[in-house]
Image (tube, coloured by chain):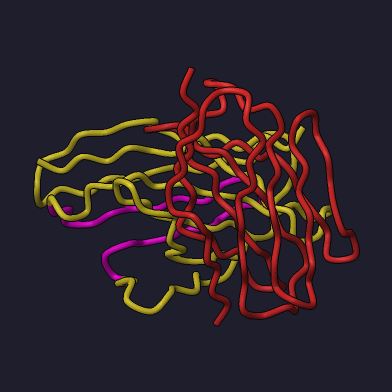
């Protein structure tokens, strides 16, 4: 069964820093990988979706990469802002379902 | 496009009662819908997968007689928590996979259930 791991579990940075969140998965037979943001008590906001044939996706200050063969993905956030504070979840999909990592809780201090 | 709604957004019920949560795909047809549960400060855990017109497939450890799932149409799935207990208090999130968008899931806003 697919297992998804996210490191670090929590991260606190000063405003303006660039940062990297990591995600690894055990089974490389995936269809896509998705990064979500979740604010406390709220649902999921999709940030980036990378299909298995792609290596990266970019949206504004966010860049996500995918190395399917090694089972790794990174989410790069440039010039972090206090509004970026949230929990970031990585999820991988195969032909059956989607599995989530435990998330990285990010705090960006003003 | 690809909007999924959930109703209610929050519910409080007494122990021993049943609660039904609806998940609707508003602008697309969903062959498959998924139900997740999220406890405080934890990630989403898949509870079950439902395909329109057939029985749901439950994850190991999820009681199918307690969490009744019905996927009667291509736009609606329901989760009924029967004989609710305080430990069932959680955030329940559904997602839907579109007929014409292979393997991409769209998530509802979630339902906060509190059992007193």
| B24 relative position to B30: left or right | left
- Residue reaching furthest to the top: A110
Which corner quadrant of the image does residue A23 belong to? bottom right
Give chain B's shade.
yellow
| Residue in the image at 52% along x and 51% along y | B77
Is B98 rendered above or below residue A59?
Answer: below
- Residue B32 lies in magenta, yes or no? no
Observer-nearest of A107 and B113: A107
| A47 relative position to B44: left or right | right
Position in image of residue B107 (x %, y %): 59, 43
- Main secondary structure type of the part rendered in magenta: strand
Q: Which quadrant does the C terminus of chain B fall into?
A: top left
Is A98 rendered above or below residue A61?
Answer: below
Position in image of residue A72 (x %, y %): 69, 67
Observer-nearest of B70 and B108: B108
Position in image of residue A1 (x %, y %): 55, 82
In this figure, what is the number of numbered marks? 0
- Residue B69 lies in magenta, yes or no? yes
| Residue in the image at 70% along x and 60% along y | A73
Which corner quadrant of the image does residue A25 belong to? bottom right
Observer-nearest of A29 and B4: A29
Which segment did they paint magenta? B65-85
| Residue in the image at 47% along x and 56% along y | B35
Q: Which quadrant does the N terminus of chain B fall into?
A: top right
Position in image of residue B13 (x %, y %): 17, 38
Chain letter corresponding to the colour red: A
| Residue in the image at 33% along x and 53% along y | B80
| A100 relative position to B39: left or right | right
């Amino acid at each position: 069964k697919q297992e998804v791991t996210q490191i670090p579990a929590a991260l606190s940075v000063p405003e303006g820093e660039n940062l990297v969140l990591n995600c690894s998965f055990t089974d490389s037979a995936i269809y896509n990988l998705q990064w979500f943001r979740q604010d406390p008590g709220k649902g999921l906001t999709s940030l980036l979706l990378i299909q298995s044939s792609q290596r990266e996706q970019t949206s504004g200050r966010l860049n996500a990469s995918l190395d399917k063969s090694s089972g790794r993905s990174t989410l790069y956030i440039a010039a972090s802002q206090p509004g970026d504070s949230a929990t970031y979840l990585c999820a991988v999909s195969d032909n059956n379902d989607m599995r989530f990592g435990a998330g990285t809780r990010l705090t960006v201090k003003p | 496009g690809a909007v999924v709604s959930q109703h209610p957004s929050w519910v409080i019920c007494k122990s021993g009662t049943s609660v039904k949560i609806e998940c609707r795909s508003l602008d697309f047809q969903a062959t498959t819908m998924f139900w997740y549960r999220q406890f405080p400060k934890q990630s989403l855990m898949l509870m079950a997968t439902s395909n329109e017109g057939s029985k749901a497939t439950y994850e190991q450890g999820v009681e199918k007689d307690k969490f009744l799932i019905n996927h009667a149409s291509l736009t609606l799935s329901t989760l009924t928590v029967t004989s609710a207990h305080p430990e069932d208090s959680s955030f329940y999130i559904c997602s839907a996979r579109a007929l014409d968008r292979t393997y991409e899931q769209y998530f509802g806003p979630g339902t906060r259930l509190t059992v007193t």
